[in-house]
Amino acid sequence: MSNTPPKPKPTMIEFRDVHKYYGEYHALRGINGTIRAGEFFSLLGPSGCGKTTLLRTIAGFEGIDSGAVLIDGKDMARVPANLRPTNMVFQSYAIFPHMSVAENVGFGLRRDPRSKAEKARAVEDALEMVGLKGYGARAAHALSGGQRQRVALARALILKPKVLLLDEPLSALDKKMREHMQVELIKLQRQVGITFVLVTHDQEEALVMSDRIAVMFEGEIAQLADPETLYRRPNSKKVADFIGTMNFIPAEVVGETGGQIEVQVKGLGRARLEAEQCPAGRGDAPVVGLRPETLTLLYPGQTTTERTVDGIIDEVIYFGDMTYYDVYLGGTDVEVRLSMRNTPGRPILEVGSKVDVAWSASALVLFR
Amino acid sequence: MKSPGLRAYAIGYLIFLYAPIALLPIFAFNDSRIIAFPLSGFTTNWFAEMWADRQLWRALQNSLIISGSTAVIATVLGVFGARASTRYAFPGKGGLVGLIMLPLVLPEMIVAMSLLVVLLAISVPLSIFTVILGHVLITTPFAVAILSSAFQSLDKSLEEAAYDLGEGPVSTFRLIILPLVAPGIISSLLICFTISLDEFIIAYFLAGADTVLSSYIYSQFRFPAKVPAMLALGTILVLVSVTLLSIAEFFRRRGIAKTGGKDTGGFL
């Protein structure tokens, strides 16, 4: 084990104040940020937030109205899509329907000076990498959704691009297949070491797959961080609301001393928060956010060192491995959702039960 | 089809539609110059008489030049029109596409008359070239309609994928777009050809001294003796038309199946 921190990876893509208009519509509103070499990066946001547009500015399918997009240090302003060191996996996969699997995968090698036999081997290797060994002769239009996606991956990766762009590649697959492909994509990315940029509207997918995530709303990056920071320390109520489940409880700031902020949280009581728990304010009415899993339901006879508050169970939602409880806190109208892992010997409680809920001030995030 | 009334209607409709056409081959092989039942015997004389008609051959030659040129020009225009209407958004697009499609419903008589007036006014001599002009006008909407369906079923990301993989616009058109819309192009060529070959009014108005097949057939009907030979010719034309349209439809459907699109109708 070495004590030196890992060297920060060099920058692969850089956005410098990128603006894009569609007529009057301001689609990208000053995008800044960097994507590092070899990282699995996700652009996450609701539909219409500009994430696909931003991806397409990297690929060169969309021009930008001001600012700059740099790939590997080079300004891409005058570089057309066919000359950029990027390849894309399209949402529809865009498999050429009139070609065989091998012709599809080898399409990008047309200008490659290697011999026919060498190219055929490269195609076979690429197919093997995505688990489609021996599929080369098949007609492309006869493939299943999952197979098409693999062909699209092989076709893009065979050119060894600096950046692989993935436009919602998993959205057309069913849930089981999607989860399977998520893991495969992560493995593939580690194996080839190429920078992956994924567009997705699925926050779970982004959390599972990415090294870092840019959360976008209305043409702006709201937060760019690693999944854990994004989940634990969202920098705004909007991001907190978009990522996972978050309880929001009205609060009042009662004092600020030495970087710490003291708040009075409705239903919970007073709490002293560290500065890192209080992202820069936007002037909204203050609320604290807390994740369901940071709250614990105390069973009769159980004790805790954490602070507790009494409550009444209003709703029980059973998920198999987990149970969600909606609980009214401390005789107020504040309702929070908390999640408990279901373990043997831990009964599912009933609606109307009086319970104690343990909570910790360190799990709170203040938005104001 | 549960109601007997509807069934009778459908059968009556089909008889009304196709019985006259069925009469063509019957009398084309009937051994009599008089077109009436009862039939008097089997003969292929009328086909032989038709075959020997030199004027007919000239008219046919003119018609083939007109139909062939019309099919090519209308299809080329159709490719541009369909590509523009399916791929690009520009102000006034709806109106423009409407204007392109308008000749589809414009009475041919009006088109023929107005073209004749204009051509005479600017003293263009009437010939098969003026017929081609008129035919291109009326067949282009068909070409645009057929090719639009071909271009529409073409996923835009296929082109982008080709760019993404290193191809330029020209090679992308050749390697991706053309093979995928080729069935539509063949279908458009065949349908425009057939429409032009069958067309009468414009050909009659604008051909000047040149004769084309349709107007020649019409002129021959004035002589009762010539009628059986024209029925023989008509029989062949029906066969050719049906064959060409079937081939066209085959290619159109295959094109849609190839690109994995859904069939949204067509002409057959």
Image (cartoon, helix red, strand yellow):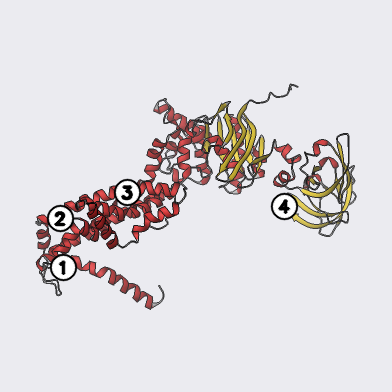
Q: Please, what is the three-letter code of the amino acid marked with disc 4?
A: Phe
In front: mark 2 or mark 4? 2
Measuring from the top left, give residue A87's x and y in whole percent. 52, 34
Question: The numbered mark 2 sits on a residue in which chain?
Answer: B
Callout 1 and callout 4 share a chain: no
* Amino acid type for the residue under numbered disc 3: Thr
Q: Which mark is residue B75?
A: 3
* Discs 4/3, front: 3
Q: Earlier in the sequence, mark 2 or mark 3?
A: 3
Residue, disc 4: A319
**Whether residue B97 can be seen here:** yes
- Chain of the residue displaying label 3: B
Callout 1 environment at 10 Å: few (<14), some (14 to 19), or many (20+)?
Answer: many
- Pointer 2: residues within 10 angstroms few (<14), some, or many (20+)? few
Would residue A210 appear left or right of A351 to someone viewing this image?
left
- Please state, as top left, top right, bottom left or bottom right, where the C terminus of chain B lies in the image: bottom left
Q: Which residue is mark 1?
A: B27
- From this view, report whether residue B46 is shown above or below residue A367: below
Q: CA distance from mark 2 to mark 3?
A: 28 Å
